[in-house]
Amino acid sequence: MCGNARCGSTLLCRALSDTGVAGRPAEYFLTWPDPLPDHNPPLTQFWEHSELARSNGVSTREDYLRLVYRLGTTPNGVFGAKLMWNYTPYALASFQQMPQFAGLDAAAVLTAAFPDLRVVHLVRRDRLRQAVSWLRAAQDGVWLTSDTEPARPSGTPAYDRDVIAGMMDLITTGEQAWLDLYAQLGLQPLEVAYEDLLTPEGYDAAVRSILRHLDLPDDVAIPAPRTRRQADRINDEWVQRFGEEVQARG
């Protein structure tokens, strides 16, 4: 599962995991160039220093990769993972520091790490709302909510036109970077739009289309979504304000 921040990836990854046949995609390879202990969720420079590694008694990167393959694989042998572009270059560098991936370019790393690779590319048509959602989550620390995961804001969101514009640029850059990488891989991803997941019919159709993309039977039961939509009047107000300010500036 590939995309850019705030594209609905957690919603869709949990849906695939809940089918029991499409792997258990999650952000196993989340990394950053420097440790950020105050970030929520915590970002660590190396996967073997992560909470997932510590909780499973793993201390080397090779053992971490074996752990991830096990955790991310459903009984039918399908493995799933999620990558967002803003940290993918760092994740690739972490692979390349391992002997078995040393000297390989990005496409070769992914091909070696994930044999028979299939890609689901998740996009959000409304990049302004995507950027607004990204800014709010970065400010208040609420990246998802569900029946068992209530919102616990750690900060107060504040409108910032320049940051929103910058995040829209990052999303645009990330989308093109993914397309360039797919071309290097020589594969055609299945594109799914976040907006199509907002109705029960669209959600069901999207999950079944992914199952077919993975050459899996699509006649399994599709469980209800496990995350809630977070957008509220603040998002609407920021979107309207940004549009008005852009129009006023010509």
Image (cartoon, grey):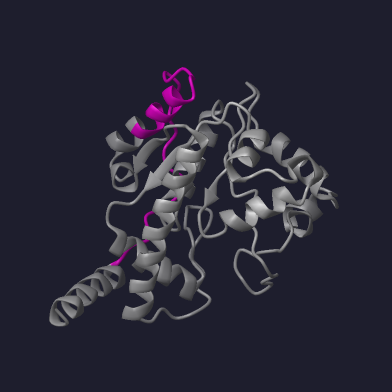
140 left or right, relative to 206: right
Image quarter where the C terminus lies is bottom left
Residue at the image point whose x is 48% and y is 19% from the top = 215
Name the one closer to the observer, 35 or 239: 35
**Residue 78 position by quadrant:** top right
Name the residue rendered at 44%, 33% in the picture: 223
User: Which residue shows up at 70% across the image and 63% down it?
Assistant: 44
Furthest-front residue in view?
103
Most foreground residue, 215 or 88:
88
Residue 31 image point, x, y percent: 65, 59
Magenta-drawn segment = 206-232
Instruction: Say if 104 sits above or below 129 in the image.
Output: above
- Camera-nearest residue between 236 and 112: 112
Q: Residue at x 48, y 36 (%)?
A: 119
| 82 relative to 191 in the view: left or right | right
Q: Is residue 210 magenta?
A: yes
Residue 212: % across, % down: 42, 22
Magenta stretch contains residue 72: no
Q: Main secondary structure of the magenta part?
A: loop
Expressed as whole percent of the image width and height from the top left, the position of residue 61 reads 80, 49
